[in-house]
């Protein structure tokens, strides 16, 4: 490529393909369309009918649609792929991306187990391809404000936290596959909360976990309570439930309590961030709203999650320009996945487990 062609190429929007066109991919595509300097130029889904409906609703021409990822990689020049297919499909799609030297963003849980995760991370490293896991909960406006308040030293050294998500929302309507998965709430939802715990307090030395299945008509656990001992000295309780019946369901809000040596932070329902600070022997309280701004395409009650997808993808684009690693790069997210594995092991073996490290 000559200099002029190279500079035109660097000004052109990044060309991405969306692999997997199901429930959540819609949010990813809407979010890419909100961002400058990037364009989704091709779609792929194994299910031709689903692909056709998805393509039609986003005005893609049939020539941009593929039912075989291999053909897509061969025929379309790509700067990245955004994988929104189920976890079981990730390894083969990432292997293809590596063969074609195409950077990868991949939905959580990005691997079926830690061995699978290692294989994918190593394959990307060998191919010189970047791997980022689409972990968006830490990008929710309210969660990020909580992380920032802690990092700014609002309450001094933290020593205790509770990260809680309890709902009775019917998640099976949009995601019916969740009813038949043997590992349900920790793998699907707890993974996000465990990632928030890592974003707040760092790596985990020991983990205990208790699970239950309350709903009779699903395969996996719908309630889990985990206790994490972080290397930083913080103890955190991470609890989640899809069996909690309440008149005011906070779905899909994550609620957070943090106690520190000089105060406490509470992220309360209704996106209220309350900070109590010890000053001159007295506790002073501030409270502000940290609600997400709704994208034009948002479909309540999913708004906080949808906004976090825009923020996650915007950060990925920004890091590409500065050559910095996105927060949830492959090796980082290995440690979140390791907490999921440790939680299932701890629950099954009724003991404290030391999570694997990279
Ligand atoms: N980050 C979040 O907040 C969030 C929320 C929901 C789902 N997810 C994740 O997104 C992923 C997809 O979930 P979903 O609810 O959209 O599932 P879904 O079943 O609605 O969609 C997945 C699509 O991928 C297609 N697919 C399967 N194998 C494929 C392959 N090899 N190549 C191309 N397409 C393939 C399926 O035909 C289907 O249309 C999962 O990993 C899930 O955990 C993340």
Image (tube, rainbow, N blue to C red):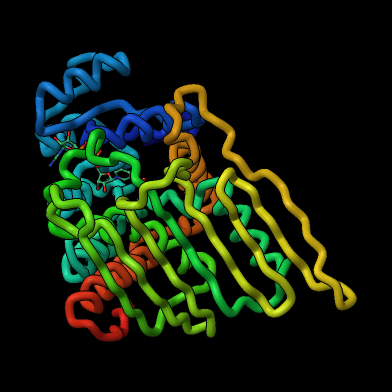
User: Where in the figure is residue 304, as x and y percent of width and height?
Assistant: 49, 40
Q: Which residue occupies 17% across, 70% down?
A: 115
The total number of labels drawn is: 0
Q: Which residue occupies 17% across, 24% down?
A: 51
Q: Is residue 87 left or right of residue 296?
A: left
> Which residue is outermost to the right?
280
Quadrant containing ligand 1 reads top left
For the C terminus, give its image quadrant: bottom left
Q: Which residue occupies 16% across, 54% down?
A: 91
Q: Is residue 100 left or right of residue 246?
A: left
| Between 106 and 305, the one nearer to me in the picture | 305
Quadrant position of residue 356: bottom left
Q: Is residue 53 left or right of residue 194?
A: left
Quadrant position of residue 171: top left
Residue 340 visible at all: yes
Residue 54 against residue 73 in the figure, above or below: above
Residue 110 visible at all: no
Residue 345 against residue 222 in the figure, above or below: below
Q: Which residue occupies 15% across, 35% down?
A: 74
For the N terminus, give its image quadrant: top left
User: Where in the figure is residue 246, as x and y percent of width and height?
Assistant: 42, 46
Q: Is residue 174 left or right of residue 140?
A: left
Quadrant position of residue 338: bottom left
| Between 351 and 22, the one nearer to me in the picture | 351
| Between 314 and 301, the one nearer to me in the picture | 301
């Amino acid at each position: 490529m000559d200099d002029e062609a190279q500079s035109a190429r660097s000004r052109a929007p990044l060309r991405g393909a969306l692999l997997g066109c199901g429930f959540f991919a819609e949010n990813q595509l809407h979010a890419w369309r909100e961002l400058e300097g990037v364009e989704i130029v091709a779609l792929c889904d194994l299910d031709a009918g689903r692909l056709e409906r998805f393509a039609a609703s986003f005005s893609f021409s049939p020539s941009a649609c593929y039912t075989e990822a291999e053909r897509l990689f061969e025929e379309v020049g790509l700067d990245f792929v955004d994988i929104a297919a189920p976890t079981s499909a990730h390894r083969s799609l990432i292997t293809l991306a590596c063969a074609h030297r195409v950077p990868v963003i991949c939905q959580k849980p990005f691997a079926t187990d830690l061995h699978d995760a290692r294989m994918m991370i190593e394959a990307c490293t060998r191919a010189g391809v970047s791997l980022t896991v689409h972990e968006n909960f830490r990008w929710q406006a309210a969660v990020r404000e909580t992380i920032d308040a802690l990092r700014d030293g609002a309450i001094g050294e933290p020593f205790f936290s509770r990260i809680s998500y309890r709902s009775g929302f019917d998640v099976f309507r949009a995601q019916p596959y969740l009813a038949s998965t043997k590992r349900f709430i920790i793998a699907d939802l707890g993974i996000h909360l465990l990632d928030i715990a890592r974003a707040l307090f760092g790596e985990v030395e020991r983990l205990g976990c208790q699970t239950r299945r309350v709903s009779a008509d699903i395969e996996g656990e719908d309630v889990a309570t985990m206790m994490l001992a972080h290397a930083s000295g913080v103890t955190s309780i991470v609890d989640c439930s899809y069996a909690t019946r309440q008149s005011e369901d906070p779905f899909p809000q994550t609620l957070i309590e943090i106690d520190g040596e000089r105060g406490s932070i509470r992220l309360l329902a209704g996106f209220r961030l309350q900070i109590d600070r010890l000053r001159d022997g007295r506790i002073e309280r501030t409270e502000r709203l940290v609600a997400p701004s709704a994208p034009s395409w948002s479909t309540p009650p999913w708004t906080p999650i949808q906004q976090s997808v825009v923020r996650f993808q915007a950060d990925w684009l920004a890091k590409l320009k500065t050559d910095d690693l996105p927060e949830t790069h492959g090796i980082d997210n290995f440690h979140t996945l390791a907490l999921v594995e440790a939680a299932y092991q701890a629950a099954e073996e009724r003991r404290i487990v030391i999570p694997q490290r990279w």
